[in-house]
Amino acid sequence: MKLKSFVSAGKVCVNFSDLVLFNLLSSVSFYINCWEHAIVRSLITQVKKAVEA
């Protein structure tokens, strides 16, 4: 990314309660965990093939 290539159009302030933030981060963690389980096997297979080549 180039220096000063991003220009902010404005600022937003959001207040989360502890429970809302916990639920949001739990959802993100669940999504990442599911993504890892779905994708990791194909990535390992690709790397093994690349190493063998």
Image (spheres, helix red, strand yellow):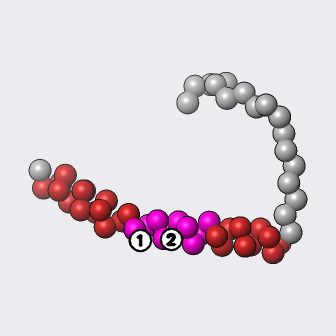
User: Which residue position holds label 1?
Assistant: 37
Q: Which residue type carries mark 1?
A: His
Report how far apart the C-alphas of labels 2 and 1 lie in the structure.
6 Å
Seen at 20% across and 60% down, the residue is 48
**Secondary structure at numbered mark 1:** helix
How many labels sit on residues?
2
Where is residue 1 drawn, in percent x and y?
55, 30
Circles 2 and 1, Cβ within 8 Å, touching? The answer is yes
Seen at 86% across and 69% down, the residue is 17
Where is residue 20 drawn, in percent x and y?
80, 70
Where is residue 35 drawn, in percent x and y?
46, 65
Residue 7: which quarter of the image? top right
Mark seen at residue 33: 2
Where is residue 12 drawn, in percent x and y?
85, 44
- Density class for disc 1 (Cα within 10 Å; few <14, some 14-19, many ≥20) is few
Return the residue found at the far left: 53
**Secondary structure at numbered mark 2:** helix
Point out the stretch of residues depicted in magenta.
28-38
